Image: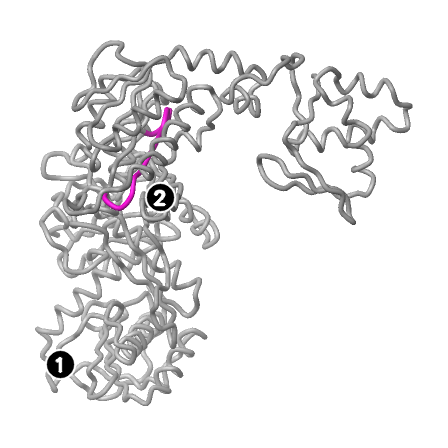
Amino acid sequence: MRLALRHDVYRATTSTGLTVLTHHGLVSFEGTSIAAWLDRLEPFLDGRFGLEDLAARLDERHRPMLERVVGALVEAGVVRELEEEPSVGGGTPEERYLGYFRESPDAAFRGYRRRTVLVVGEGPLAGAVARACERSGAAGAVSACAEPPDGDAGDIVLLVSDGLDLPLARRVRERRAGSLIGYAAHLGDRAVIGPVASATVDGASGRRRLAALRPEPVPVDAPPPSAEHLAVVANQLVQRVFRAATGLADDAERDRLTSIRYADLETAHHAFLPHPLEPPPPAGPPPPGDGAAPTGERRTGERLTEEELSRRTAPLVDDHTGVFAEIAQRGYAQFPVHVSEAVVADPMALAGGPVRVVGAGPDFAAARYDAALRGYAVYGSLAVDPRRLSGETVRGLRLLDGTPRDVPARQAFPVLDGAVRSWPVLGAAAGYSWEHAVEKALLDHCRALALAALHTVREPLPSLALDDMELDPLGDRYRALLHATGDPVTVLDLGGLLGVPGVLVRSGPRGTVGVCATGTSVGAALRDALERSLLGYQSRRHAEPAYAPPALGPLPPHLHGPLRRRPDGARLTLDRLAAAVAATGHDPVVVPLDHDPEVTRRMPNLLQVVLADG
């Protein structure tokens, strides 16, 4: 391989070595001798010699050092390795640009000049794109106002639309399957370009992901962008087309969306997942499977740690195309309980726009993890693929014996019935393991069943002395914080209602904050109730109703019974918890929320527990 020093690098000797400015940015080398080595090598780094040629001029003692220096320079992009001696002459600007990346830039540019571009769309942005294509060196640019024609009108096709226009994106994909396809859209205050020549995702998927977080149409009265700003957007799109057509773009560049705000030309890149309703491009890999393991295998689902949850979730957070627009504290108060909010995409347009859900915990990380898990549960309930519904039913797993059972689709996906009052929906859960998610969903149902049973109870409920209860360190901390508020606190034992540990805690002025919680033990239920009580205090004190616990009406006076001794603190197993729910006349059935395979692959423990008729 011949070695050539890039002609546009600038270097400066430093006290510790050498700093070089390349087209990728600054690169620093440690070692005071490397600058001297580069000075001596520079006359020979013109593409005529290879490493063996240079080594032949040195004795055995200096050859290892030469190899290390040249290797470091090549790895940093300061020196290029060439198969052939570079041609004499500067070439065109396009060829010089390609020369940064390709060994034969003239051949790559000749290939691009033989291609024609079809621009589908109308309006100022489409016109700017057509003009940019003409200037880029392509053989020609053809415009089609509304529909992509069949045939060979262009082997590069660019769809440029006002708004997202999903039907047109699909028609372009279907009619021009063998073409290099790129997308751009004018969205009022900004433009979005990409993907371009992707082999794994297409424009319809990208536009669906955009619509899931930004469902509003382009405002009719939005001020038009200036011609200069449209030219910037068009040039960025055509540069990406040029890079893809000449083989410079990697998969990440081909797949991503780029948003450009007209007001200040702020540019941001956005990765996104294939949408479950949109197949990948025909040239790409086969469509992913539905991601669902056989229902009976879910009891041994993948176990995640908090670190793994964080690693998998981080790429899904994006304010334009993410599963989550953000997971953040916003401006919420963070004492006595930390609070975080997840903004969840609406992938099938069933909720009318993004859904906000709040998580809480004793510290920043715990609140974010809780918000993320609750956000996954919301997303799983919203990602309903109608093709996956068997008529009016879906198949689930009976918790009592592990056998399959069909349940009404509208019970597994309550959003199909219309507006949902609170998120996540009752019985939807995501967890660190399949068992963890099932436990959370069952306890959610138990809480609702206990609250419903309060309306029919005739006998007094035992009261519990909060200070006498045995709690874990977190529960003990919450107890101390609630006492520090100065509000009176009363606790009722609800364990006798269902045979599941549960408590009802009232606090605040005149007991205005009432929370009900169930758990696998009395201590766990009380810890959860104390956290919710603190959230009620915090939301009232700071006028932040977004995370206030649901309001409970006053209890009849006769339900406040006498104090009882500390209840049994034994932990309830998952099987006993399912049996307790079944004893209320219901058949608990687990339905995987797996209609988005890409999300399920990252969060496999995502489910809905349906209480079917017993």
| Residue 119 percent across, percent down from the top left | 26, 22
Give, as a single range, the part of the protein colored magenta.
188-201
Instruction: Calculate the distance from the C-alpha at mark 2 to the C-alpha at mark 1.
Output: 40 Å
Amino acid type indicated by mark 2: Pro
In this picture, residue 320 sits left or right of residue 582: right
Q: How many marks?
A: 2
Residue sitting at x 23%, y 68%: 499
**Mark 2, residues whose alpha carbon is within 10 Å: few (<14), some, or many (≥20)?**
many
The N terminus lies in quadrant: top right
Of the image marks 2 and 1, the number of the one nearer the N terminus: 1
Residue 159 visible in the displayed image: yes
| Residue 49 percent across, percent down from the top left | 75, 16
Tell me if residue 226 comes above or below residue 511 in the rendering. Answer: above
| Residue 512 percent across, percent down from the top left | 19, 82
Residue sitting at x 79%, y 17%: 52
Q: Which residue is mark 1?
A: 554
| Residue 190 percent across, percent down from the top left | 29, 43
In this picture, residue 220 sits left or right of residue 125: left
Amino acid type indicated by mark 1: Pro
**Mark 1, residues whose alpha carbon is within 10 Å: few (<14), some, or many (≥20)?**
few
Residue sitting at x 70%, y 32%: 73
Tell me if residue 444 comes above or below residue 146 in the rendering. Answer: below
In the image, is residue 596 part of the stretch drawn in magenta? no
Residue sitting at x 26%, y 82%: 491
Q: Which residue is mark 2?
A: 604
391 or 105, which lies in front?
A: 105
